[in-house]
Image (tube, rainbow, N blue to C red):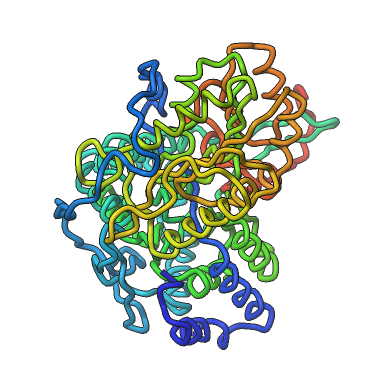
Amino acid sequence: MWQRFAGRERERKAAEFIYSSTSAVKAMAARWIASSLLSRSRSRFSPRSPDYFVGLKDRFDGSVSGILPRFSTAAAVEEPIAPPVQVNYNQLLINGKFVDSASGKTFPTMDPRTGEVIAHVAEGGIEDINRAVSAARQAFDEGPWPKLTAYERSRIIYRFADLIEKHNDEIAALETWDNGKPFEQAAQIEIPMLARLMRYYAGWADKIHGLIVPADGPHHVQVLYEPIGVCGQIIPWNFPLLMYAWKVGPALACGNTVVLKTAEQTPLSALFVSKLLHEAGLPDGALNVVSGFGPIAGAALASHMDVDKLAFTGSTNTGKVVLELAARSNLKPVTLELGGKSPMIIMDDADVDKAVELAHFALFFNQGQCCCAGSRTFVHERVYDEFVAKAKARALNRVVGDPFRNGVEQGPQIDEDQFNKILHYIKCGVDDGATLEAGGDRLGTKGYYIRPTVFSNVEDGMRIASEEIFGPVQSILKFKDLDEVIRRANNSCYGLAAGVFTNNLDTANTLTRALKAGSIWINCFDVFDAAIPFGGYKMSGHGREKGIESLKGYLQVKSVVTPLKNPAWL
């Protein structure tokens, strides 16, 4: 969205933040703007069903057939279907009320199927972030949320999950309309997963407890786990509600209050579900939602002196700016879930048909807009040619079209900027000498649809093999042996995830321990559970989300020592 404005308009909006900030923050905000021009904020991340894709990819039919002409696709884009939903919430949510921005300004959120405006949404700025943080601070210091019993907090979050299920299709339609992902994916996988995640964290709320620690002497020692305070959270556009759950869920379960900055491309669904959370009984000020632009609202939140903890999902370049803003303000702790260039390794003993289907899913899911997408497909030389031929056929058979239409596998990319970025990388692949096997251009003349694209004969040094594309572009590389593929797979600044397809347990175990990534999937991909931590090595971020590890980021640890007089035991 930031990039949609003309240059002068960007400068005007940035000045609102920069000219009102300290010199250090001015510099950081300027870098945020530069970062947003260079790489798109995204997240992370692929959705999961209530069973977290267990069995989802077990429906391999054992064949990949239907060879089409080289650059055709399995479906054409037709006239867009009218979404079965209305936009009811387009203001900021501060202190339990929907309000206009302090400036009165709005910005358009767009339909990626057409490039047309869906609605105008309140544009949060510095004053709005200040209002939201003030409400969250009051709710934490004086309000009821951290003072409620843990059981009562859990009941409110459980009620929220029930309301999500009640409004499943309405929420899914908003997500599809604003984001472009297939409605079936949103309604059958992502929104049920949102409810599942919230129930997971509701279950944790009354199970967070401290320890009594034995000391070397007559002392009673308690270790307390306390809520950290006001949490600033910045979520991406690729999986808005799943990232909402990953951040809001553990923060609230631990008794914190939240200021959430939504992605400017996809503000609608978070506003809708936050209204449901208040209907479930969340006290005013415990969750505040500000829509706005990263270089202004995001930078203001990251640098705010009264925010105690920050969590960000997005690009690595922007993550660096967020981390520095947090450090230069009050040294607040930061959880970062950033970019990836995940290897998908196909060994020579693999069932090629099944490997092709899994590798296709690992890359093309969610229009390729997944931080952990298997975007470097390494295939053993013995099965390479067969794999490439079948991967090409599968891509040509992929159903691309209006995401509200039944059976569509791939909708449009999020916006024009991402669309152009992907087409740029496709051109880079051709220019660098890779073989374009399928796709390579846009589909239709309206919206941001791109044909599923496959490159073979890809080398490590090519841009499509080393840089995060975040789109439906599969790069297939050839390798000879295990040592080689380990070395090449690890030769990346990223370390978010990796996939392995093999029938050899020893090979699987060797790769599991050798690959430097936060998640390793053996003969599967994107298999998750609410209890499984997710996060990266190297420049894919630090800290973990989901599971018990995510709770640690929202708790302070306090040691309390009291002398004992004449204790009966120690």
Look at 66% across and 78% down and name the residue there.
27
- The answer to whether one can see residue 275 in this image is no
2 lies left or right of 80 = right
Q: Position of residue 437 (x, y in %)?
A: 48, 40
398 lies left or right of 279 = right
In the image, is residue 224 above or below residue 177?
Answer: above
Q: Position of residue 119 (x, y in %)?
A: 24, 68
Q: Quadrant of the C terminus?
A: top right
In the image, is residue 425 above or below residue 5?
Answer: above
Give the number of marks. 0
Task: Determine the image quadrant of residue 177.
Answer: bottom left
* Residue nearest the viewer, comparing 249 with 501: 501
In the image, is residue 504 above or below residue 448?
Answer: above
Q: Position of residue 253 (x, y in %)?
A: 46, 43
Q: Quadrant of the N terminus?
A: bottom left
555 lies left or right of 206 = right
Q: Position of residue 91 (x, y in %)?
A: 29, 69
Look at 30% across and 54% down and name the residue there.
269
* Residue nearest the viewer, comparing 23 with 279: 23
- The answer to whether one can see residue 525 in this image is yes
* Residue nearest the viewer, comparing 175 with 161: 175
* Residue nearest the viewer, comparing 524 with 53: 524
In the image, is residue 142 above or below residue 550?
Answer: below
Task: Determine the image quadrant of residue 210.
Answer: top right
Look at 61% across and 63% down and name the residue there.
322
Residue furthest to the right in view is 216
